[in-house]
Image: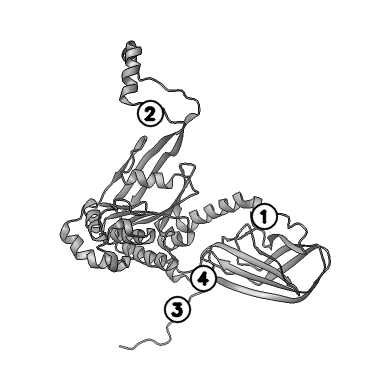
Amino acid sequence: MSEPAIRGEKLGKRYRIGERQRYLALRDILTQTAKAPLRLFRAGAPKSSSNGTGHIWALKDASFEVREGEVVGIIGRNGAGKSTLLKILARVTKPTEGFAKIHGRLGSLLEVGTGFHAELTGRENVYLSGAILGMKKREIVRKFDEIVAFAEVEKFIDTPLKHYSTGMQMRLAFAVAAHLEPEILLVDEVLAVGDAAFQKKCLGKMGDVAHGGRTILFVSHQMNQIRRLCERVMWIDNGQVRECGSTAEVVSAYEAATLSRDVGKAQRPDGGRSKAHFQAWEIVEPRASQPHMLNSLAPVTVKFIVQVNEPVRAGHHGIALYDAELRLLWGTEANSIRLEPGIHQFVFTFPSLPLRPGFYTWRVSLYDGNGLVDMWDCLPEFLVATEPVTHSRDEWAGILNLPSRFESSCLEEKVT
């Protein structure tokens, strides 16, 4: 078995919150000393008022191991401690307690343009970043053209970085970190800045880096990216490692917990005196631990509740299903609907919904002869938590989670 590339042992980071201690200039200190000279000889430093101050543990008792060549995702809510952990590993900040051991040359992409200098040109910043990563000049020269081409900044490579847009800086920063071949790469939500085309390009590059045997720690809120890239996932919650294990198991548990927190969104706010108003939705069958979760490939019945305040004649109802990337997966319609005032339910039955695990969104609408009556992107989102039966590598798994059976038999034996 390979040696650990990264090992964290009871890592913790504590920050002070609340009021700052008043800044004292040299003249203030001299004045205080002149007024009360004995203060200098008292034990300990002068203490400021504790009103409004305190401490918070951004990370607490985090112990883990990452093996050489592993791609490990780090997930959790905003403020859970993910970025703090990566900053400790990158030696940007010191832990309050515990320690981390790293074996190998480390590259990090924690924030857009970290380590770049605004007054230097793009070319100079590539060489500067390479030197910071510990690369020799000949290594940077060998990779330079590839870096610039990937970042798509050829026309501006000799322009000072301060004239780059945020997107251009991010593309160049990612290109440097990904191409200069550190043995360990830390990436913190950087793909959230780029457009869809660049995100796809970065994911492809990170996949190449991972398949090349390098170690990657990848923080992201995009579970589709985590599923595509990561072999294992570490879930951090309230500064502590809540779960660590296979991607499918940990991501499914995290999504189920996220859905539980969103249960208050199940009832849509009252639409007032609108003609009609979608109120809520749920999965009637099969039942799961949450009314908006599907964890079976059995037949599915979905119900949408509509409050009708005025008669609807010749109504038109539309429904569509979107994935997390807002791709339209399915849609249908119902025409010539007549609705009297009252509470109605629209029910759809499917023989199966063989969708890949993850979050999806129903969009429902109602029109009449005068145009749109109501449209709703249903909340909470629709969580599919079925067991994956597709390819183990996400990029080859597609959209559907179709079960299949494989058999192999010999039709004719070759005679030798």
Measured from the top left, where is residue 318 in percent x and y?
A: 68, 72
Q: CA distance from mark 2 to mark 1?
A: 49 Å
Q: Are discs 2 and 1 less than 8 Å apart at CB?
A: no
Mark number for residue 399?
Answer: 4
Question: Which of the two labelled residues, at mark 4 and mark 2, occupies the earlier sequence position?
Answer: 2
Q: CA distance from mark 4 to mark 2?
A: 57 Å
Residue in the foreground of this view, choosing between 275 and 347:
275
Q: CA distance from mark 4 to mark 1?
A: 26 Å
Badge 1 crowding class, 10 Å Cα cut-off, few under 14, some 14 to 19, many 20 or more, is some
- Name the kind of residue labelled 1 in the image: Ala
Q: Secondary structure at mark 1?
A: loop
Question: Which of the two labelled residues, at mark 3 and mark 4, occupies the earlier sequence position?
Answer: 4
Q: CA distance from mark 2 to mark 3?
A: 77 Å
Mark number for residue 408?
Answer: 3
Question: Which of the two labelled residues, at mark 2 and mark 1, occupies the earlier sequence position?
Answer: 2
Q: Secondary structure at mark 2?
A: loop
Q: Residue drawn at (18%, 63%), measured in percent from left and top?
A: 141
Kindly identify which residue carries mark 1. 266
- Name the kind of residue labelled 4 in the image: Ile
